[in-house]
Image (cartoon, grey):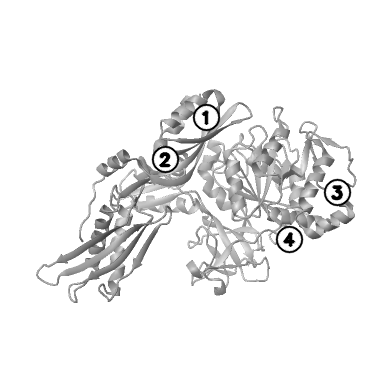
């Protein structure tokens, strides 16, 4: 089936685990004719959860894609993981869509994952909607839930349809009054009242539409005017529609497809994607136009290393038309690749297509140069173009890994690299000083799943060491350092002398290297060597062996010898001068602090709060939720949370759960710094 950009809708289903995203994904595919029957998580036959580990665990670990096609609509649906442990793939999927549909459990209500993903979508300028699922559950208080949604996300959260007959059906409350009984009621009250609220919300954003509405009433508004005003409301965050469904039985699912076609933006109507051209201070915003005849601009938002297909790059086309057999460049690469095969995805299935128009989502295989966030284009006019980076959560949990058997080091490194390509919140580091490979993820569960993939998908067994916390080092005061490096061994010697000062920078500022040398006392060709020596200390730390951050190094003087000065001498002098300055600059070890949200039955409130207090936690507040649960929000040092999952399970009879996000770094207590410093055996040499 051929279709145009105007018929495309790209929608990501997001939200808290257990809200029913995968079930809704199946129901939409079934209602749209893409499936003869909807699969279920229990039977392990859903389109999106096709990975063996997903089937084993009963929840999504990665984003999956499938499409619905019917007259006037080509809907690309992305089912994203709900667990915060797998937020990397979920956030990556947001780069490919115009609309995020946040699925909310009618029983559980607003959860941590709902808030976080709504905030991410808002920051990205995406259109947002709330889909309340499980509306047919007997205990669901939908009226209270709508009030809670509006309190949490603002008065702009308003229903497009309403549940009726105890959630057995839904009734429209946005469309024209024509043909509707003005006295019709829903489970949430008179339909006419909700209709008026959403009409008032939509028309007030557009002055022309508002004037027509005031002059002529609702009947004087054309369908085009109302549609354009609705689109503007979505783009500007002035409206967050609420829709009601029961994905399990199909209530409201067909209506959701109708809403996607009639009201959600196509790729030419949403906020433009944040592309820039150039780097650093020279980077300037550019607009990618959804013109099928223009040069191609596409962004790779998902990488899959399939053992049978090879590397698969899934991309969203923003400009131009990608056609089979055409030549495309990857980023600023000089050598193009040929699009030998072009695919649409349907879960694990790959359906070959002839072209992908602006706004569409497609994939190419067996192109080794592809990587996450790569830009594909067909002309060097589009070199140096990239999307503004997504703010992914920091991977703070670490494990040192090594192959279980000797001779597997390269195989392990290759497999870990492939896993890191697939998940932007999974990182692989190599510590030269300890000769350790460390993997970092968002949680202990995240790392366990990645190690299971390492074994099952790539055939590599790995041994692990206890978790490593991502401590950092910095300084609290300014100071100066000096070192003269001089070696004479009979022949040509080594000589380099460096004077520098260090200054603390605000938290999160990173590192700056400044050259203030006057009169050529250190020749320009040796300044990179000085910086190299400084960066060696930055990488390995000076107090406890952790990377340094948030400081400035200013090299202002030195000496050289016309014969004996060499690069190696200034590397050593820069390194020792930097260590000299750090020792006098009140060095500090910083620890990661996380935002923790714990949900547990109300009767366990004391156990939860007491347990957190023993972990140096700062409790910021507690809330009571429907169903007799409490939510405790706190800031806690990450180092204190080792084994917390088992501890919480024991304290709450298995009913407690938690989510965390990185917050900031702050200095560790003095006794902790002393312990870390004593455990560190620095090895500095002059070579």
Q: Residues within 10 Å of mark 1 (few under 14, many from 20)?
A: many
Left or right, 215 with respect to 547, comes to right
Q: How far apart are marks 2 and 1 (CA)?
A: 19 Å
Upstream in the sequence, badge 2 or badge 1?
2
Q: Position of residue 667 (x, y in %)?
A: 37, 45
Image quarter in which the C terminus is found: bottom left
Residue ID for mark 2:
638
Upstream in the sequence, badge 1 or badge 4?
4
Q: How far apart are marks 1 and 4 (CA)?
A: 46 Å
Nearest to the observer: residue 89 or residue 208:
208
Q: Position of residue 611 (x, y in %)?
A: 44, 29
Image quarter in which the N terminus is found: bottom right
Query: Which labelled disc corresponds to residue 656?
Result: 1
Q: Where is residue 374 in the image (x, y as percent from the top left)?
A: 52, 62
Q: How far apart are marks 3 and 2 (CA)?
A: 54 Å
Q: Give the quarter of the image for residue 255.
A: top right
Residue at the left extreme, as displayed? 490
Residue ID for mark 3:
176
Q: How far apart are marks 3 and 1 (CA)?
A: 46 Å
Looking at the image, is 321 positioned above or below residue 264?
below
Nearest to the observer: residue 180 or residue 61:
180
Left or right, 437 with respect to 163, comes to left
Q: Depth-wise, is mark 2 or mark 1 nearer the camera?
A: 2
> Residue at position x 35%, y 49% from top?
437
Upstream in the sequence, badge 2 or badge 4?
4
Residue ID for mark 4:
6
Upstream in the sequence, badge 4 or badge 3?
4
């Amino acid at each position: 089936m051929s279709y145009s950009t105007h018929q495309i809708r790209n929608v990501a289903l997001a939200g808290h685990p257990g809200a029913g995203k995968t079930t809704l994904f199946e129901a939409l595919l079934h209602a749209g004719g893409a499936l003869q029957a909807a699969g279920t998580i229990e039977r392990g036959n859903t389109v999106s959860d096709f990975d063996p580990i997903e089937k084993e665990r009963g929840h999504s670990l990665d984003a999956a894609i499938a499409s619905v096609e019917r007259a006037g609509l080509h809907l690309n649906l992305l089912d994203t993981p709900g667990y915060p442990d797998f937020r990397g793939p979920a956030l990556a999927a947001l780069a490919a869509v115009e609309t995020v549909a946040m699925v909310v459990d009618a029983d559980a209500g607003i959860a941590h994952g709902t808030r976080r993903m709504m905030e991410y979508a808002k920051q990205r300028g995406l259109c947002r909607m709330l889909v309340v699922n499980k509306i047919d559950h007997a205990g669901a208080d939908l009226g209270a839930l709508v009030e809670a949604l509006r309190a949490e996300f603002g008065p702009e959260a308003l229903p497009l349809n309403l549940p009726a007959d105890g959630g057995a059906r839904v009734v429209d409350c946005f469309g024209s009054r024509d043909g509707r009984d003005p006295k019709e009621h829903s489970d949430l009250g008179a339909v006419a009242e909700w209709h008026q609220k959403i009409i008032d919300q939509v028309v007030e954003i557009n002055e022309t539409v508002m004037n027509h509405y005031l002059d002529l009433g609702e009947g004087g508004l054309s369908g085009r005017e109302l549609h354009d005003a609705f689109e503007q409301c979505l783009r500007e965050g002035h409206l967050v529609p609420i829709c009601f469904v029961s994905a399990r039985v199909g209530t409201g699912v067909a209506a959701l497809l109708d809403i996607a076609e009639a009201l959600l933006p196509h790729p030419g109507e949403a906020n433009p994607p944040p592309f820039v051209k150039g780097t650093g201070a020279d980077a300037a915003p550019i607009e990618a136009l959804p013109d099928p005849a223009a040069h191609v601009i596409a962004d790779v938002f998902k990488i899959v290393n399939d053992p049978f297909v090879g590397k698969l790059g899934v991309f969203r086309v923003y400009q131009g038309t990608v056609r089979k057999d055409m030549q495309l460049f990857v980023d600023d690469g000089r050598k193009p690749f040929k699009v030998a095969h072009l695919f649409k995805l349907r879960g694990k299935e790959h359906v070959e297509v002839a072209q992908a128009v602006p706004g569409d989502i497609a994939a190419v295989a067996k192109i080794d140069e592809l990587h996450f966030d790569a830009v594909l284009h067909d002309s060097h006019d589009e070199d140096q173009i990239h999307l503004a980076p997504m703010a992914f959560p920091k991977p703070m949990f670490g494990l040192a890994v090594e192959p279980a058997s000797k001779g597997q080091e390269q195989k392990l490194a290759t497999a870990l690299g492939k896993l890191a390509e697939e998940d932007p919140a999974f990182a692989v580091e190599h510590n030269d000083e300890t000769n350790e490979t460390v993997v970092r993820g968002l949680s202990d569960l995240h790392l366990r799943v990645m190690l299971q993939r390492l074994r099952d998908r790539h055939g590599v067994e790995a041994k692990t060491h206890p978790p490593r916390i991502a401590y950092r080092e910095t300084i609290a005061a300014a100071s100066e350092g000096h070192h003269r490096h001089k070696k004479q061994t009979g022949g040509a010697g080594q000589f380099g002398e460096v004077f520098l000062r260090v200054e603390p920078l605000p938290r999160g500022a990173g590192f700056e290297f400044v050259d203030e040398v006057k009169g050529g006392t250190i020749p320009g060709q040796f300044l990179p060597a000085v910086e190299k020596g400084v960066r060696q200390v930055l990488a390995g730390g000076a107090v406890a062996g952790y990377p340094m951050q948030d400081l400035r190094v200013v090299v202002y003087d030195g000496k050289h010898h016309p014969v004996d000065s060499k690069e190696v001498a200034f590397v050593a002098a820069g390194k020792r001068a930097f260590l000299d300055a750090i020792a006098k600059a009140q060095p500090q070890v910083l620890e990661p602090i996380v935002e923790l949200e714990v949900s547990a039955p109300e009767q366990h409130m004391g156990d939860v709060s007491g347990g957190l207090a023993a972990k140096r936690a700062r409790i910021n507040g507690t809330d009571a939720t429907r169903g007799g649960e409490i939510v405790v929000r706190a800031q806690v040092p990450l180092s204190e949370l080792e084994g917390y999952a088992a501890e919480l399970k024991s304290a709450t009879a298995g009913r407690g759960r938690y989510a965390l996000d990185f917050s900031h770094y702050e200095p560790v207590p003095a006794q902790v710094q002393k312990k870390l410093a004593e455990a560190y055996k620095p090895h500095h040499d002059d070579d």
